[in-house]
Image (cartoon, rainbow, N blue to C red):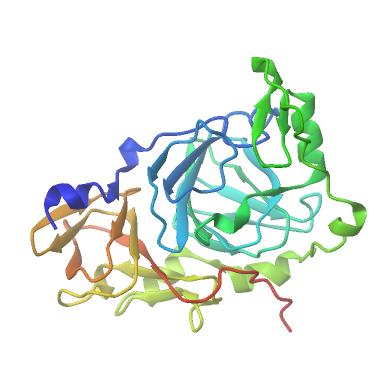
Amino acid sequence: MTPQEMERRIVRYGDLKPCKTAFIDAHTPGSDQKENFTIIGGGVSESPDQHVHIKDTPGFNIGAAGQPPKCRNSLHSHRTAEVFFVLKGRWRFFWGRWGDAGEVTLEEGDIINIPTGIFRGFENIGTDYGMIMAILGGDDAGGGVIWAPQVIEDAQDHGLILSDEGKLYDSKKGEALPDGVSPMPLLSEAELAGFPEPTTRDVVPFHVARYLDLMALADRQPAPVIGADAMLRDRPGFEVDFLTRGSIPDTMYQTDRHEVLMVMRGHWRLGWDGGDAVLAPGDTCAVPPGLEHSITPAMSGEASLYRVLNTDDPAGPTWRPKT
């Protein structure tokens, strides 16, 4: 593989192209300043304006959300896994039908595997623009987003209508639902009753891993973060490992799986027969199956990254009440 070919598989943080109209709450006060990024795969954006950096999916999708302080993402649900780690800032994640069943605050480097099948939202509670990186299960990211009814109603009050096909129409631009197309129906009370309301105690111990804990666990070997036998035990169609300076492989290695490297801190040198490339914080690299390669810190200082590998597990529901 030539350096030029590999560079096309790297999405640089500085090259990310945001979409400010990705979702139904793009005009709703409090959510109207957020930016959505689709890095690998089609993601779950509802807007034709969404730029996709790498369209081929490795069995999961990679995206990001950028938000200024006090900006929030409205309550929604997914049928497959939604995993976030905080790249920049301080974030509050909350969940439940009205967002009050439970919550947790995440700092830079922390990761959360949000349970599927519950309404969830998140808010930048830091003092500067924040960024969270996302991993979504499945090639089609679970078939889109399921919005809490009040989100759809609030959006319509501010000019955005979501069709039952999952496409947005902006009345402020003179758009309207085409003939024969209906608006997205609101979930009924019976349907809403099927969404779990787990507490903070139900979720945090089993779905959140802290950066400092992962740094300690990865001192001598990659720390398994999400997987059948990982710190957060789950099988959502992908596995996540955490690497730091003390846990990098000693030699070149290869895998028959899709491997995505997501740099958290420091600069990392990716080497292969044919070239090398340096990855910086916020960069995302899709390493193709079968390529023999190495990944090592490129300079002194703190260095960490998340590594995502596809698995044969179905990208289905993952939350179960813990006993």
The residue that appears at 72% across and 70% down in the rendered structure is 201
Q: Position of residue 257 (x, y in %)?
A: 34, 72
Q: Is 272 or 123 nearer to us in this picture?
A: 272
Outermost residue toward the right in this view: 189
Describe residue 60's horizontal placement relative to residue 112 as left or right. left
Q: From the viewer's perspective, is residue 91 above or below residue 172?
A: below
State the residue in front, 32 or 253: 253
Q: Nearer the viewer, residue 161 or 309?
A: 161
| Placement of the N terminus among the 4 image quadrants | bottom left
**In the image, what residue occupies the spot 64% across and 39% down?**
72
* Residue 230 % position (x, y): 48, 79
Q: Position of residue 31 (x, y in %)?
A: 65, 33
| For residue 87, side relative to residue 183 (left or right) | left
Q: Quadrant of the C terminus?
A: bottom right
Displayed quadrant of residue 115? bottom right
Residue 213 appears in the picture as rendered:
yes
In x, y percent, where is residue 76?
70, 49
Q: Is residue 247 above or below residue 179?
A: below
Picture quarter containing residue 162?
top right
Q: Residue furthest front?
A: 180
Q: Is residue 132 at all visible to an observer of this figure? A: no
Locate residue 77 relative to residue 139 in the image: left or right. right
For this view, does 233 lie left or right of residue 284? right
Residue visible at 56% across and 76% down?
Answer: 234
